[in-house]
């Protein structure tokens, strides 16, 4: 079995840019391979954060998780990707997806054809990153002329393109067009369906998945005890659980109705009650527990086809402790 990669995700709520740089340095020392940062509209900018992280680290790959081609054009994404690849010495990965419709709506953007736009954008970005001219008239991106070409020396190391998202169609597109995929795996048990769709997309495109990096994006909480790890997850599960679809919940024996009391507590403005209503079985939405429990779950994911375990907040009740303890997970798995 090939070596499992470990990635870690941060977002604007993780702290200041300086704090994320510190987490990145700890993660690099702990043995992580990749650091990903979420590009969420109206929050801290992933490109600035990743530039700071790249400048402060030596080995860690840095990646966007994820940008979209609607609020920034494919041309601008290619420019930034090539520039950050130059600065990082070949350690950048472009994670791209269709974007979040409600957030794009804040600035008057509407994705009439999100998957078509993503498909066209990935083709355009790849052409630009190869140094090619990219005249193009598509269904979403139109009016590109022969002047559409990056006009500075491109880094020798190609920029890997990872496709991110959750829906069935975008998951198939990962296998069809990506160097890797960033599927949201809440709970981890949905991995079988994800792998099947990625393989279907690859087969349709006549590709194999040799060298493809399937980065299973999971919630993660590591603590000195199972209870401590689970308590750190309560706010996340209480907030997001009521919005999860039936097909996402089914693999762990839950249904949307199980979250109705939590939804009602949120609607009444009682966050503490919502968190208290999180049941033990709901913690299976994440990878959580003590060292042995977490190692077992990671090995299981690897056995189902994940080539990277990509962990995200809360990480644990004490983030720095959890990061250093995750080094033991990495060592045990490897």
Image (cartoon, rainbow, N blue to C red):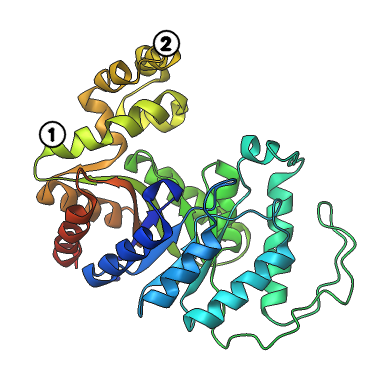
- Look at discs 2 and 1 and give the one toward the viewer: 2
**Residue 114, x across and y down, in percent:** 70, 45
Could you say whether the residue bearing mark 2 is in a helix, strand or loop?
loop
Q: Residue at x 35, y 78 (%)?
A: 59
Left or right? Give the position of 178 relative to 32. right
Q: Residue at x 61, y 65 (%)?
A: 206
**Residue 177, x across and y down, in percent:** 61, 63
- Mark 2, residue position: 268
Left or right? Give the position of 289 relative to 286. left
- Mark 1, residue position: 227
Q: Which mark is residue 177?
A: none
Could you say whether the residue bearing mark 1 is in a helix, strand or loop?
helix
Left or right? Give the position of 7 relative to 36. left
**Residue 281, x across and y down, in percent:** 23, 26
Q: CA distance from mark 2 to mark 1?
A: 27 Å
Task: Please state, as top left, top right, bottom left or bottom right, where the C terminus lies in the image.
Answer: bottom left
53 vs 297: above or below: below
Task: Please state, as top left, top right, bottom left or bottom right, where the N terminus lies in the image.
Answer: bottom left
Corner quadrant of residue 309: bottom left
**Residue 203, x across and y down, in percent:** 57, 59
147 and 199: which is toward the camera: 147
């Amino acid at each position: 079995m090939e070596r499992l990669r470990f990635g870690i995700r941060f977002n604007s709520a993780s702290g200041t840019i300086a704090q994320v740089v510190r987490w990145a340095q700890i993660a690099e020392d702990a043995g992580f391979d990749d650091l990903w940062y979420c590009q969420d509209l109206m929050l801290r900018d992933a490109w600035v954060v990743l530039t700071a992280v790249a400048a402060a680290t030596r080995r860690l790959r840095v990646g966007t998780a994820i940008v979209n081609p609607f609020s920034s054009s494919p041309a601008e994404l290619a420019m930034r990707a090539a520039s950050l690849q130059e600065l990082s010495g070949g350690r950048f990965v472009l994670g791209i997806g269709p974007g979040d419709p409600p957030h794009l709506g804040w600035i008057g953007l509407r994705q009439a054809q999100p998957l078509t736009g993503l498909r066209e954008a990935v083709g355009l970005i790849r052409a630009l990153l190869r140094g090619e001219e990219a005249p193009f008239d598509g269904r979403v991106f139109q009016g590109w002329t022969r002047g559409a070409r990056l006009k500075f020396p491109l880094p020798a190391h190609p920029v890997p393109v990872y496709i991110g998202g959750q829906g069935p169609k975008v998951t198939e597109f990962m296998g069809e067009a990506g160097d890797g995929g960033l599927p949201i795996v809440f709970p981890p048990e949905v991995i079988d369906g994800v792998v099947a769709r990625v393989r279907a997309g690859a087969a349709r495109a006549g590709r194999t998945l040799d060298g493809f990096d399937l980065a299973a994006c999971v919630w993660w909480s590591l603590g000195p005890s199972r209870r401590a790890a689970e308590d750190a997850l309560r706010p996340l599960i209480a907030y997001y659980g009521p919005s999860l679809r039936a097909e996402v919940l089914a693999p762990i024996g839950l249904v949307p109705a199980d979250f109705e009391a939590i939804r009602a507590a949120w609607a009444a403005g009682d966050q503490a009650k919502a968190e208290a209503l999180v049941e033990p079985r709901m913690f299976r939405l994440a990878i959580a527990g003590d060292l042995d429990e977490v190692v077992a779950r990671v090995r299981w994911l690897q056995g189902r086809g994940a080539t990277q375990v990509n962990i995200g907040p809360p990480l644990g009740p004490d983030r720095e402790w959890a990061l250093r303890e995750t080094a033991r997970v990495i060592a045990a798995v490897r």
